[in-house]
Amino acid sequence: MINRDICEKYNIPLHSVISIAGTVGVGKSTLTKALAEALGFKTSLERVENNPYLDKYYADFTTWAFHLQIFFLAERFKEQKRMFQYGGGFIQDRSIYEDVDIFAKLNFEQGKMSEDDYDTYTSLFNAMVMTPFFPHPDLIIYVEGEFDDIIDRIHERGREMEIVTDVEYWKTLYSRYSTWIDNFNTAPILRINMNDYDILNDESSLDYILTKIGKIIHTTVK
């Protein structure tokens, strides 16, 4: 149930949809759950379990890149519509925009996705998402951190498919995210370096983030 007192305290609209963005292992899920618990919002989590392509993709990028990207596009599109049809009040783990600008583009440029597949994917993405009718989030919280800390988190959470992936892939992804966020303008952005906060043990950390969320949403609301 939405915590109306907390939302009022921080001037966060009850119908807000907030997406958490950032590279793999940076702490998106931790922040998603902490914010959802504080606000009484529902969570929209990335589908990792029961994903029919994820394990296959990490085992063979070239064969499964296109399949995985189409799967994620469909899942995120349906989820984005669901959140707004529900009336908002959601914290979303990973935005729909990261797929096309980072993962699909990286797969194409590294030769893991053919030009035809990449053109098909981007054309479909633009037709589905980049229209005036698609509901964009009220705020993107971009989570960043030190690369070595991110690699430590990847190993700590113990997903074998990630652990055995070449560290050069994670370095490239890390760099791509930095470039992406510097050029992103589809929704308002709040940048947070997780090394500066301890949201699990320090209430003031979450207080600061909630305060910033309210200010940015109210500044940009039309």
Image (cartoon, rainbow, N blue to C red):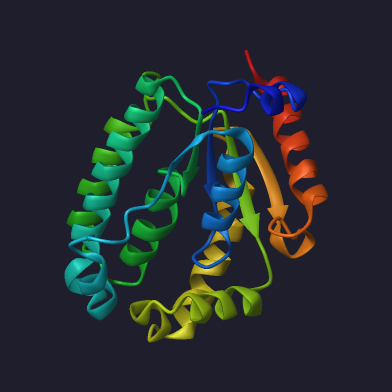
Q: Is residue 104 above or below residue 129?
A: below
Quarter of the figure with residue 12:
top right
Question: What is the number of callouts on the image?
Answer: 0
Q: Residue at point 24% right, 80% down?
A: 59
Quadrant of image for the C terminus? top right
- Which residue is drawn at the image coordinates 76% and 25% (left, top)? 9
Seen from the viewer's position, the closer of residues 86 and 75 is 86
Where is residue 185, by image quadrant?
top right
Q: Find residue 109 and report its horizontal and vertical position in percent.
A: 36, 66
Q: Position of residue 17 (x, y in %)?
A: 51, 30
* Along the viewing direction, whichever of 62 and 41 lies nearer the viewer: 41
Give the percent coordinates (x, y) of residue 173.
49, 68
Apparent side of residue 46 relative to residue 68 in the rendered image (left or right): right
Q: Choose top left, top right, bottom left or bottom right for residue 97.
A: top left
Pick whichever, 17 or 9, lies toward us: 9
Residue ID at (48%, 75%): 157
- Using residue 199 as the reference point, say whether residue 117 is left or right of it: left
**Rendered position, 211 above or below 51:** above
Residue under the image location 72 percent in, 28 percent down: 214
